[in-house]
Amino acid sequence: MTDIDFKILETASPEIKQLVLFLLDKIEQLTIMHEQAQQRILELEQENAKLRSQLNQNSKNSSRPPSSDGYKKKSSPNLSKLIKEGEKKNHGGQIGHKGDTLLQVAEPDKVLTHRPSSHCKCGHEFTAEDQICVEKRQIVQLPPVKAYVEEHQIYKYKYKCPSCGQMHAGVAPSEVKTAIQYGDSVKSLIVLLSNEFKIPVAKIKSLFGTLFGIKPNESTIISAISECYNKLETTEELIKENIIASEVAHVDETGIRVDNKLHWLHTVTTQFYTYFFPHTKRGKEAINSEKSVIPRLKNWLIHDCWNSYFSFEAVKHAICLAHIIRELQGVIDTNTKSMSLWARQLQALIISLIRTEFSERVKKRDDIFEEYDKICERGFSLELLPEKDIGKKGKGKKTKARNLLERVTKLKSCVLAFVDNEVVPPTNNLAERDLRAVKVKLKVSNCFRSFEGAQHYARIQSFISTCKKNNKNILVEIQNTFAGHNFITQQ
């Protein structure tokens, strides 16, 4: 009220004065309530936007795993569709794909002939010399499978040497230790079924009974796995040394259940070698432990932008662009077209660079870095810093889009490392593919019963993955390991 209003109010009756003061008090209360309501509306709008963003997340626009999509998978474009150009593919094998077509063999194990009758209806008689083979059809069959028993008979002379009195006896091979035992071929198949094919112990026993008529018990199966683990100790050290000497190493980690507690399986992998190790922690404590080889790396390190990896200053860092593309897709899916313009442009730039030949990228390097900076500057003009909330301490909470923009700006050299470094791949898919096997095992077995079991799996799987990368027969190499050598220790 103005001074004039107060002067008029002085001449008013007490009833009018009381009414006016009551109304003024109500107005003040309503003003405060309105401000509080406005603040609450703003908070609810922010919370609603956050929840809607979470609902819109899937494996194509965030770091969520594909298994979280459920059965109703959204049709968001994945990385391969965004990167690969061309028309819609036809069904079946693609041009250049190396298939495993079933082909006839030159020398079959068994030949069955189907000859026509030598008698014609007209009475003519054909001879065997008149026939020719016009077609060959082959069926691939499995031979009858049955375990065979190899007996070692140990002889000795009935009497001592008459000259010196020494007793002479035959000596069994060192691996034949008991009256009856399973051989290396059985133990190798047990290890293969357990690690590579993720078959539980009970089913391994059942499968052996069905195929071979023998049923190794649980302790035998566990002992075979433990023996293989021990025999691979030297092999594991050689794998680690080869990884350390490699020009590029990929690192990643994934959660596993050990004795119903959360643990982490870490991997360091290259084009030809894979190394796994389990740990109770995910971050610096794990990757700096004695089991880790990351502190000993000196060249390129490819990872998913996990902050702990940046503590290693001796290596050159490159981050996985598949993750960046998915996060950019998340910004596009949860914002308006104008607000997500920078994300669309940056995603298009990265995808076009992945498609571009290395020699062309090197020629246009300066232009690429300049265009990258312009897109980031454009993003900062759209993704403004949030205002500080009234009555609350600290800075306003940044949006995911703002955090992503600041990260790709700060780590520009890591994002664009593949542009002018031919050995650097654009993604960390190599490490992620290696970790996929343990996820399948956990879906079958749910968890490892003990940390020791997780260690056994990690070392053996390191060797199996390395065998695959070097095109070696896994079963043969495991059997060679039981015999004391394999293709790595012989190098």
Image: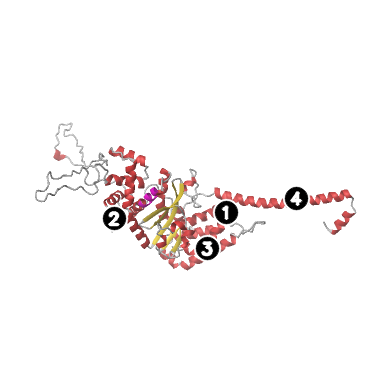
Frontmost of labels 4 and 2 is 2
Upstream in sequence: badge 3 or badge 2: 3
Give left or right: position of 421 versus 119. Answer: right
Please say if the residues under marks 3 and 1 sit with CB atoms less than 8 Å apart: no
User: Few, some or many C-alpha atoms within 10 Å of disc 2 (few <14, some 14-19, many ≥20)?
Assistant: few
**Which numbered tag is attached to residue 487?**
2
> Which residue is located at x 54 percent, y 54 percent?
332
Give left or right: position of 138 versus 26. Answer: left
Upstream in sequence: badge 4 or badge 2: 4
The magenta stretch spans which residues?
Answer: 452-459
Upstream in sequence: badge 3 or badge 1: 1
Please say if the residues under marks 1 and 2 sit with CB atoms less than 8 Å apart: no
The residue tagged 3 is 409
Give the CA separation, mark 3 to mark 2.
45 Å
Give the CA separation, mark 4 to mark 3.
46 Å
Quadrant occupied by the C terminus: bottom left
Upstream in sequence: badge 4 or badge 3: 4
Give the CA separation, mark 3 to mark 1.
20 Å
> Which residue is located at x 71 percent, y 53 percent?
35
Q: Position of residue 478 (x, y in %)?
A: 30, 50
Give the CA separation, mark 4 to mark 2.
82 Å
> Which residue is located at x 61 percent, y 49 percent?
48
The residue tagged 4 is 30
Q: Amino acid at mark 3?
A: Thr
Establish if 82 lies above or below 372. Answer: above
The residue tagged 1 is 335
Upstream in sequence: badge 1 or badge 2: 1
Name the residue nearer the viewer: 120 or 257: 257
